[in-house]
Image (spheres, rainbow, N blue to C red):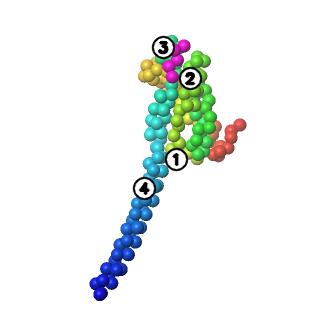
Amino acid sequence: MLRKARHDVRQPLVTLLGAVAASTLCLGLAAAPARAGELDRHQWMRAVTKSLHEQIRPSPAVPVAVRMQKAAIVGAHFDGEGQLLATSLDVPTGNRVLDDEALRAVNHTAFPRLPAEMRGRVRMIPVEIFFATPQANRNRASVRRQSLDLAASVRQLHAEVPAGQPIG
């Protein structure tokens, strides 16, 4: 009888421990997609580049030789939570058709939420748009320099603005 009583206590205890373990596993799995869904800065840039590349349409009205050497920089403006608010043509190509396509492509790009380290304040991220392979563009280094300079000047402008506050 003593043996049966010990078994009777063990069974509910094992069942309770099993339930706790299953609940913990379920909670862990439920939280995992949130952590797994967070992209770091490099993953975010790769995802944006891929999505942007899919959005750029050919512009037959502009000769290939011209498209190969043109690039635009479009500012993607994000709120403090990392959601895209607006876009702006910050460095135009000088060709209205290509400039319109650059803005259209960025506006149709599926921007994932900004990585946690980039959230917390309003920010503008310069997006370089090349209308051919970037390596084929002779001005690639100049475009990158302009992009970095633009980012630095905007970062300084936004430095004193708390998240969610408009500028201007």
Bin the neighbour count of mark 1 within 10 Å (Cα to Cα): few under 14, some 14-19, many 20 and up: few
Instruction: Give the Cα distance between marks 2 and 4.
Output: 42 Å
Give, as a three-letter code, the residue at label 2.
Glu
Give, as a three-letter code, the residue at label 1.
Ala
**Is 165 in the magenta?**
no
Q: Position of residue 99 (x, y in %)?
A: 58, 21
Q: Which residue is mark 3?
A: 64
- Span highlighted in magenta in the image: 57-61
Disc marking residue 29: 4
Q: Earlier in the sequence, mark 1 or mark 2?
A: 2
Residue at the (60%, 45%) spot, across then down = 80
Q: Which residue is mark 1?
A: 116
Residue 106 appears in view: yes
Give, as a three-letter code, the residue at label 3.
Val
Query: Mark 1 or 2, which is nearer the eye?
Result: 2
Q: Earlier in the sequence, mark 3 or mark 4?
A: 4
Residue 94 appears in view: no
Q: Are marks 1 and 2 in contact (CB under 8 Å)?
A: no
Residue at the (63%, 40%) spot, across then down = 158
Query: Mark 4 or 1, which is nearer the eye?
Result: 4
Bin the neighbour count of mark 4 within 10 Å (Cα to Cα): few under 14, some 14-19, many 20 and up: few
Q: Which residue is mark 2?
A: 101
